[in-house]
Image: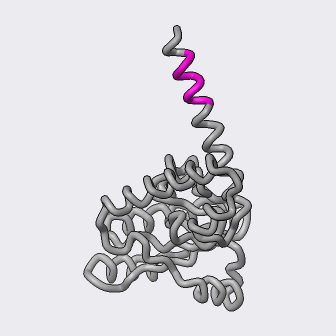
């Protein structure tokens, strides 16, 4: 009984910590993680954010993959917004370390939801838009790129509620990269 009560209290504290961190960070659009930490007034909030960011860094470091943090430069987002009418968007593949916007999809939503992540791009419950503009710059890993292409095709084939577009950024190197680009060019969308 006592263990159950302790576990319930710990779960409540974790939920409170997640909600506190989430509400603080969603107001800080455009701030890098270190600036976010400095803006927090409470040392408890700072500690929670530091723990979350450290855990995220450790996970990304463990992947050791090429292209996991290759973000599109800010000037490219600005040009897409001005020249292509992309406007404010959601990034389909980002992290707290390279996101441009407040809302983004990420590789580790269990942690990164505390700092703005909507969830995984591949999770239809977290990300299945009916309209809007989105930027998709996946990790340059063949399996991820191909899986992204399949989901984009599925999203664009559905009957959207309004205009739906994706700005896709992928390398055109290697056989898989070139094949992906060719497949995207052949798409009816």
Percent position of residue 155, x then y: 56, 61
Specify whether 64 is left or right of 77.
left
- Kindly give the residue lying farthest to the left in the view shown: 175
**Residue displayed at 52% across by 71% down:** 98
**Residue displayed at 57% across by 67% down:** 34
Q: Assess whether residue 11 is covered by the magenta stretch.
A: yes
132 versus 112 height, above or below: below
- Kindly give the residue lying farthest to the top in the view shown: 1
Q: Main secondary structure of the magenta part?
A: helix
118 versus 3 height, above or below: below
Q: Assess whether residue 92 is covered by the magenta stretch.
A: no
Percent position of residue 131, x then y: 69, 64
3 versus 74 height, above or below: above
Residue range corresponding to the magenta coloring: 5-12
Viewer-nearest residue: 79 or 28: 28
**Residue displayed at 61% across by 33% down:** 13
Specify whether 45 is left or right of 180.
right
**Residue displayed at 40% across by 77% down:** 183
């Amino acid at each position: 009984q006592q263990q159950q009560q302790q576990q319930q209290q710990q779960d409540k504290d974790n939920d409170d910590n997640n909600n506190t961190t989430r509400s603080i960070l969603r107001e800080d659009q455009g701030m890098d993680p270190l600036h976010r930490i400095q803006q927090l007034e409470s040392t408890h909030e700072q500690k929670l954010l530091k723990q979350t960011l450290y855990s995220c860094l450790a996970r990304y470091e463990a992947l050791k993959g090429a292209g996991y943090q290759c973000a599109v430069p800010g000037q490219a987002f600005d040009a897409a917004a001005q020249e292509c009418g992309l406007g404010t968007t959601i990034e389909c593949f980002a992290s707290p370390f390279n996101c441009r916007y407040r809302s983004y999809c990420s590789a580790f939503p269990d942690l990164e939801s505390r700092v703005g992540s909507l969830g995984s791009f591949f999770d239809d419950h977290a990300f299945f838009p009916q309209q809007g503009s989105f930027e998709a710059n996946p990790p340059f890993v063949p399996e991820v790129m191909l899986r992204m292409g399949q989901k984009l095709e599925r999203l664009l084939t559905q009957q959207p509620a309004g205009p739906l577009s994706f700005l896709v950024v992928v390398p055109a190197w290697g056989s898989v990269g070139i094949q992906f680009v060719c497949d995207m060019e052949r798409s009816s969308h």
